[in-house]
Image: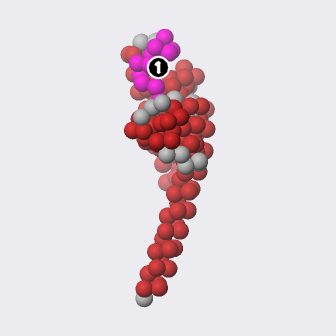
Amino acid sequence: MIQLRSDINRIEDSDLRIDMMQQTDELLDRSQHLPTGDRVLLEQVMRYGFTAMEISRLSGCSPSTVLRKVKKLQSRLCDPMFRFVTEKEILIPRGLKVTARLIFVDGLSMSKTAEKQKISMHEVRKRVAKIRMLVEAHKQVSSAGKRLC
């Protein structure tokens, strides 16, 4: 009985490790769309196993800042908006592409995006609303198509 439990635990641990490795690989694949500095930071942590302390010594940031940045990057990579902008970019109208990339891929704030594009905050908000509506419409069309098949 004890042997069986340890075998089951080993199998579960093995499955968990495989799932975690697959998730890590997926995140690293998606990170190719990130700005270079963000991508390198994620690779240092996820691929090469650097600790926050080691990265903080190299970068001059505190370990808590490094951890906070890694968590933000991971959540951005899992955000459906990031995935839509990087995977379905062809569906985004030309006038919205730069705004979509700056906000959802590069992680800039709306104010920094407005400054960088030399447009008003109001215009950035309108563009973000249009992008969100586009994503929602795509979801509805995709789910309707799946129900038909």
**Residue for point 47% across, 42% down:** 52
Instruction: Specify whether residue 33 is in view.
Output: yes
- Residue 41 placement: quadrant: top right
In the displayed structure, 63 sits above or below 46; it is above
Q: Dot 1: within a 10 Å radius of its alpha carbon, few (fewer than 14), some, or many (20 or more) residues?
A: many
The one of 127 and 20 positioned closer to us in this rendering: 20
Left or right: 138, with 111 as reference point: right
Q: Is 111 included in the stretch rendered in magenta?
A: yes
Residue at x 57%, y 56% (from the top left corner): 22
User: Is 65 contained in the magenta span?
Assistant: no
Residue 66, x across and y down, in percent = 45, 37
**Measuring 61% from the left and 38% from the top, which residue is drawn there?**
32
Q: Main secondary structure of the magenta part?
A: helix
Callout count: 1
Give residue 113's position: percent from left, percent from top: 46, 20
- List the single residue furthest toward the bottom: 1
On screen, 58 above or below 127?
A: below
Where residue 59 appears, as percent x and y from the top left, is 51, 32
Q: Residue at x 46, y 42 (%)?
A: 53
- In the rendering, at what x and y percent does residue 69 appear? 44, 36
In the rendered image, is residue 89 in sight? no
Query: Looking at the image, which is closer to me, 36 or 140?
Result: 36
* Residue hosting label 1: 113
Please tell me whether mark 1 sits on a helix, a strand or a loop.
helix
Location of residue 35 (image quadrant): top right
Quick one: which residue is furthest to the front in this view? 57
- Looking at the rendered structure, the kind of residue marked 1 is Thr
Against 103, is 148 above or below?
A: below
**10 and 137: which one is in front?**
10
Quarter of the image that includes the C terminus: bottom right
Part of the protein shown in magenta: 107-118
